[in-house]
């Protein structure tokens, strides 16, 4: 029964041109994620988390600077809908078979944790747990074939699925490489951690993005007030469905960026 459902999911994802899929134990993520962002927080008897991934076309990173990454923005915004739709369809399939399941939003809605925005479930951490890659020092998921340009989707399910074996990713993001940190224009990366506010202030483009000097006090206020936390969740839900990206320096500097291997994507 379980294998038949897995086969149906694989066929469906293949039809959607989504080449990667992996599964992780919900229990393992329950132990690693902060409270309020665990599979069990949303589906009490969750057994498994299924993650799937699709690479962006590398050429969207080659557009000239004056386009302000509009081709990239359009591609990842479209993928949000693609992955959400796929997740919902898989949940319908599993529910029909008697297994309650939840689609994990690929982006929005988001919640706030300690004053910073965070996905309901961290798809990149779940993907790493499901054997789909390794988190690099730039905090991006890196896959041995597709590099660091994957977009992710996933579901939480009460169906106990076989856990995907984790390949040997020791050659990915080796200890001696720090190109992402050295190329970050605002020095937001440090030994595998990220100063999210510093990165967002430089990277994101949105008419409602607060001035940089207000981000730190806003983080403090949101973290201290449950009312402000909920207010910011409503604001992001209603007004941040789309946003621009001004900087991709850490992504392009990474030796695992597919454009580096192809030798045709400018790194500026």
Image: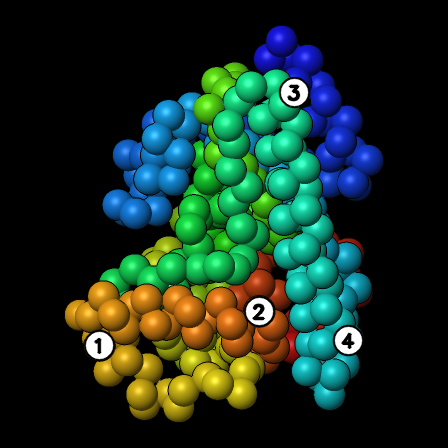
Query: Quick one: label 2, few (<14), some, or many (20+) residues within 10 Å?
Result: few
* Closer mark to the observer between disc 4 and disc 2: 2
- Pick the quarter of the image with the N terminus: top right
| Image point (72%, 69%), residue name | 74
Query: Quick one: label 1, few (<14), some, or many (20+) residues within 10 Å?
Result: some
Q: Is residue 159 visible?
A: yes
- Point out the tag, 3 or 4, that comes first from the N-terminus: 3
* Closer mark to the observer between disc 4 and disc 1: 1
Label drawn at residue 241: 2
Would you name the residue on which mark 1 appears? Answer: 221
Number of numbered labels in the structure image: 4
Q: Nearer the viewer, residue 169 or 93?
A: 93
- Point out the tag, 2 or 3, that comes first from the N-terminus: 3
Would you name the residue on which mark 3 appears? Answer: 6
Secondary element at image label 2: loop
- Point out the tag, 3 or 1, that comes first from the N-terminus: 3
| Image point (77%, 75%), residue name | 63
Query: Quick one: label 4, few (<14), some, or many (20+) residues within 10 Å?
Result: some
Question: Residue 148, position in %: x, y?
Answer: 60, 53
Figure quadrant of residue 232: bottom left
| Image point (79%, 64%), residue name | 59
Figure quadrant of residue 77: bottom right
Q: Nearer the viewer, residue 135 or 21?
A: 21
Task: State how far apart marks 4 and 1 are (Cα).
Answer: 39 Å
Position of 185 compared to 265: left or right? left
Would you name the residue on which mark 4 appears? Answer: 63
Task: State how far apart marks 1 and 2 are (Cα).
Answer: 23 Å
Going by the picture, which residue comes out furthest to the top? 1
- Pick the quarter of the image with the C terminus: bottom right
């Amino acid at each position: 029964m379980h294998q038949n459902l897995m086969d149906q999911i694989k066929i469906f994802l293949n039809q959607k041109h989504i080449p990667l899929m992996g599964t992780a134990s919900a229990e393992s993520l329950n132990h690693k994620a902060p409270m309020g962002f665990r599979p069990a927080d949303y589906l009490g008897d969750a057994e498994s988390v299924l993650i799937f991934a699709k690479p962006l076309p590398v050429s969207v990173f080659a557009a000239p600077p004056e386009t302000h990454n509009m081709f990239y923005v359009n591609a990842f915004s479209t993928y949000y809908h693609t992955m959400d739709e796929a997740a919902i369809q898989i949940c319908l399939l599993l529910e029909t078979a008697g297994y309650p399941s939840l689609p994990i939003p690929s982006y929005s809605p988001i919640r706030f944790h300690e004053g910073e925005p965070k996905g309901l479930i961290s798809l990149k951490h779940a993907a790493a747990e499901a054997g789909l890659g390794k988190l690099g020092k730039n905090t991006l998921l890196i896959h041995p074939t597709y590099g660091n340009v994957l977009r992710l989707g996933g579901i939480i399910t009460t169906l106990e699925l076989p856990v995907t074996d984790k390949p040997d990713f020791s050659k990915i993001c080796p200890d001696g490489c720090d190109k992402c940190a050295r190329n970050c224009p605002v020095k937001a990366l440090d030994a595998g951690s990220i100063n999210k506010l510093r990165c967002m202030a430089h990277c994101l483009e949105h008419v409602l993005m607060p001035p940089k000097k207000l981000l730190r006090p806003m983080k403090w206020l949101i973290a201290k007030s449950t009312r402000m936390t909920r207010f910011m969740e409503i604001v992001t839900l209603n007004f941040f469905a789309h946003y621009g990206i001004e900087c991709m320096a850490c992504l392009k500097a990474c030796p695992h960026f597919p454009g580096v291997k192809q030798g045709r994507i400018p790194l500026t």
